[in-house]
Image: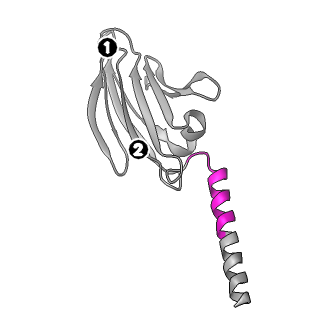
Amino acid sequence: MEILNKVAYSFMLVLVIALMSSTTTRPVSGLFIGKTYVYIINNLGPNIKFNYHCKSADDDLGERSLNFNEEWHWKFQTNWFDTTLFWCNMWWTDTNGRQVSGSTDIYKAKRDETKCYRRCRYYVKADGIYRYNSVMYRLDLLYTWPQ
């Protein structure tokens, strides 16, 4: 019986160490942390409507539009492997009447989780899409519009 207790104790010890190391080495994991929020903010300028259609492999968020200074957000749980990805097709008309369009990965868990944690803010500007970097307290250019 004593050998069985030692085996059970050893198994429990290994299990506890494995669980502790997995929670301390991963800054974000859907299993332990909770929901991630993604915000899109239209900073293109007055009277410029921003249109977009975002989706992931699992979720289609639909086609939407934002007026100047409006924002929209959604929430989700990142997967255990940090491969969660949302991408957007986007378009708008500049002040000269020219159609500007593009497509980009708006949220990539491996890229974004250490920069914006669970509150990722993306600002749409005339020169591109910026992510607020909450570690460095600045906007980082992630995407430039095609010319």
Q: Residue furthest bottom?
A: 1
Q: Name the image quarter holding residue 3.
A: bottom right
Q: Residue furthest front?
A: 1
Residues drawn in magenta: 15-28
**Which residue is the site of mark 2?**
76
Q: In the rendered structure, are the residues bearing label 1 and label 2 in contact, judged by CB atoms less than 8 Å apart? A: no
The percent position of residue 75, horizontal first and vertical second, equals 39, 39
Q: Earlier in the sequence, mark 1 or mark 2?
A: 1
The percent position of residue 103, horizontal first and vertical second, equals 39, 34
**Along the viewing direction, whichever of 37 and 85 lies nearer the viewer:** 37
Gap in angstroms between the C-alphas marked 1 and 2: 29 Å
**Which residue is the site of mark 1?**
48
Q: Amino acid at mark 2?
A: Phe
The percent position of residue 18, horizontal first and vertical second, equals 66, 64
Q: Amino acid at mark 1?
A: Ile
Q: Is residue 104 left or right of residue 141?
A: left
SS state under label 2: strand
Circle 2 residues within 10 Å: few <14, some 14–19, many ≥20: some
The percent position of residue 108, horizontal first and vertical second, equals 50, 42
Q: Is residue 113 left or right of residue 42?
A: right
Specify whether residue 99 is in view.
Answer: no
**Along the viewing direction, whichever of 16 and 57 lies nearer the viewer:** 16
